[in-house]
């Protein structure tokens, strides 16, 4: 019934089609079945298994590299986003400091202060509704109803030396400043609330701390 004795090589593959074991089996096979186990067919099958195993390993290698590359791209994008937000926040803080410093530098060492005679000049520095109240105060002064009190220093006139400014920020659109100076020798402490509108800072409110007198 059985013809020749043949040697069959069996291979064991893992889930990734890697060859993890080989087994050589000698058995007898009939002449009719022997034709299916010709050396060239067995060699071709074994070669295909090795090729497919190598292909799967290469595919997994490049897939892992692509995943690592994607992670690196995402991490880089997150880092750039964080740096950009930090840069925007720092620029906003710097512009807010420059905004207030430019205002109060006009009141030091006998400075004439900031002109607030027109509506455009007032709205250049103040946000509504405070701007509207200052415009009304200017109107009352022109009618002789009251003297205009400069909102930046909460005084009619001034003699100011050193001005101290301590700022705090909440995001990139809101800021606060504690401003301290002596006007004619009297200590004045102002709390300034800032808001950023269309990229430009405006004063939303000024509160005189030690007298608890609110301007606006």
Image (cartoon, helix red, strand yellow):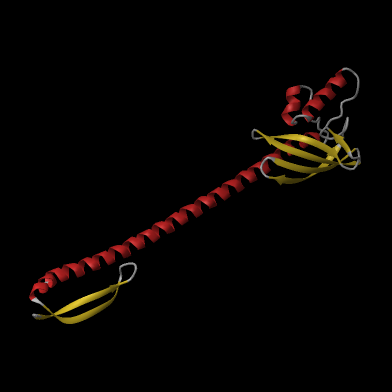
Can I make out residue 107 in this image? yes
Residue nearest the viewer, comparing 130 with 58? 58
Horizontal relation, residue 49 to residue 91: left or right: left
Horizontal relation, residue 86 to residue 26: left or right: right
Q: x, y percentage for residue 26?
A: 17, 82
Q: Quadrant of the C terminus?
A: top right
Q: Is residue 128 above or below residue 17?
A: above
Residue drawn where x is 73% and y is 23% of the image: 120
Question: Where, by quadrant of the figure, is residue 182 drawn?
Answer: top right
Residue drawn where x is 71% and y is 37% of the image: 195
Horizontal relation, residue 150 to residue 102: left or right: right
- Marks counted in the figure total 0
Residue nearest the viewer, comparing 60 with 39? 39
Q: x, y percentage for residue 151?
A: 83, 32
Residue nearest the viewer, comparing 65 with 143? 65
Report the residue that reaches farthest toward the top. Answer: 143
Report the residue that reaches farthest toward the front. Answer: 1
Q: Is residue 112 above or below residue 144?
A: below
Residue drawn where x is 39% and y is 61% of the image: 64
Q: Is residue 64 above or below residue 13?
A: above
């Amino acid at each position: 019934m059985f013809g020749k004795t043949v040697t069959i090589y069996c291979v064991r593959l893992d889930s990734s089609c890697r060859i993890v074991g080989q087994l050589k089996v000698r058995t007898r096979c009939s002449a009719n079945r022997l034709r299916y186990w010709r050396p060239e067919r067995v060699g071709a099958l074994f070669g295909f298994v090795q090729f497919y195993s190598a292909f799967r390993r290469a595919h997994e290698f490049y897939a892992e590299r692509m995943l690592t590359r994607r992670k690196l791209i995402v991490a880089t994008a997150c880092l750039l986003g964080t740096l950009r937000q930090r840069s925007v926040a720092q620029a906003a803080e710097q512009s807010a400091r420059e905004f207030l410093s430019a205002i109060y530098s006009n009141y030091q060492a006998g400075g004439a202060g900031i002109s607030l005679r027109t509506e455009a000049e007032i709205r250049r520095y103040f946000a509504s509704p405070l701007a509207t109240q200052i415009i009304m105060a200017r109107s009352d002064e022109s009618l002789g109803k009251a003297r205009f009190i400069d909102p930046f220093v909460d005084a009619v006139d001034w003699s100011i030396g050193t001005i101290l400014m301590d700022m705090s920020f909440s995001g990139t659109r809101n800021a606060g400043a504690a401003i301290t100076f002596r006007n004619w020798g009297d200590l004045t402490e102002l709390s300034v609330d800032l808001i950023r509108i269309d990229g430009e800072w405006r004063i939303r409110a000024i509160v005189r701390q030690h007298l608890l007198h609110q301007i606006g």
